[in-house]
Image: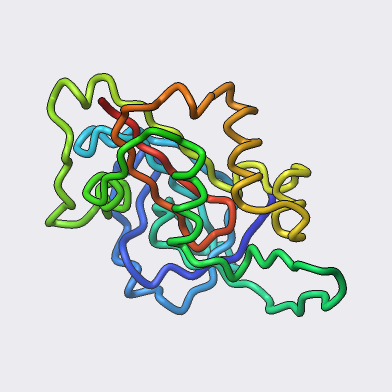
Amino acid sequence: MKQHAFTAPTGARFSKHLGTRYGSNTETANVIWYTDAHEKLYLKNLHMYSIYYHVTNQNQNLQGWIWKGYMEPISNSSSSSTSGKTRIDNAHQSLNDRVQDVLSLFLGTKYSKSASEYIDTDPEAVVQNPDPRTTAQKQSSISIMHSTTLDNNVPAIQQLKANKITFKQYVANDLKKQSINPENYSGYTIGISCSDELGDYSVLLYK
């Protein structure tokens, strides 16, 4: 896994499999964390999967697992080329526009704001965003997730970050790679979440 630098000013840091809570991230808000591993964990209380990163500080005297939603990437600003007719600017596309791009691929689905907010639920929050699904719907739900740091070195991510393909094209290609045909989910309710990390998206489908 390629190393990335983040800060995590909120939330908490845990041991592997979330067995021990090391402390609040507010105590290490200014620490720059470096990722070296990831885990996709099933959160029983939320009935869904989420991604946690293993991080260390520069001196490697601090370490732990932090939920992806707490991590804020540190990036260098870069200027875009002025050549060409229409420039793609994936890095500055709004999160709402990214959500709309994903939604446009799942034709015939019913967008749910409450389901989308549920996907964004902080797994450690005392008050969770309510789960809009019934018990039966939870059992048959389909969760699709992709995080760029899982395969940041592959051509698709490089093309996305180099503005050679649009975010919508990236998601369409990624779904095809996972053998997922979005046209098969017409009539489903859909929740969508996109993060500040370019290429990171989650989809929840249920009927």
Q: Is residue 207 left or right of residue 85?
A: left
Q: Residue at x 39, y 41 (%)?
A: 50
Q: Residue at x 65, y 36 (%)?
A: 173
Where does the image place residue 38, in percent across and percent down from the top left?
52, 43
Q: Is residue 73 above or below residue 126?
A: below
Where does the image place residue 140, in percent across and percent down from the top left?
27, 20
Q: Quadrant of the C terminus?
A: top left
Residue farthest to the right, as pictured: 83
- Residue 58: which quarter of the image? bottom right
- Residue 122: which quarter of the image? bottom left
Q: Nearer the viewer, residue 205 or 72?
A: 205
Q: Is residue 97 above or below residue 152?
A: below
User: Which colour scheme appears in the figure?
Assistant: rainbow
Q: Nearer the viewer, residue 69 or 142?
A: 142
Where does the image place residue 8, in percent across and percent down from the top left?
43, 68
Q: What number of labels is visible?
A: 0
Where does the image place residue 125, in percent across and percent down from the top left?
20, 57
Q: Is residue 41 left or right of residue 200?
A: left
Q: Is residue 9 above or below residue 185?
A: below
Q: Nearer the viewer, residue 104 or 46?
A: 104
Q: Nearer the viewer, residue 65 or 190?
A: 190
Q: Is residue 32 left or right of residue 110?
A: right
Q: Residue at x 78, y 44 (%)?
A: 155
Q: Is residue 57 left or right of residue 110?
A: right
- Residue 1: which quarter of the image? top right
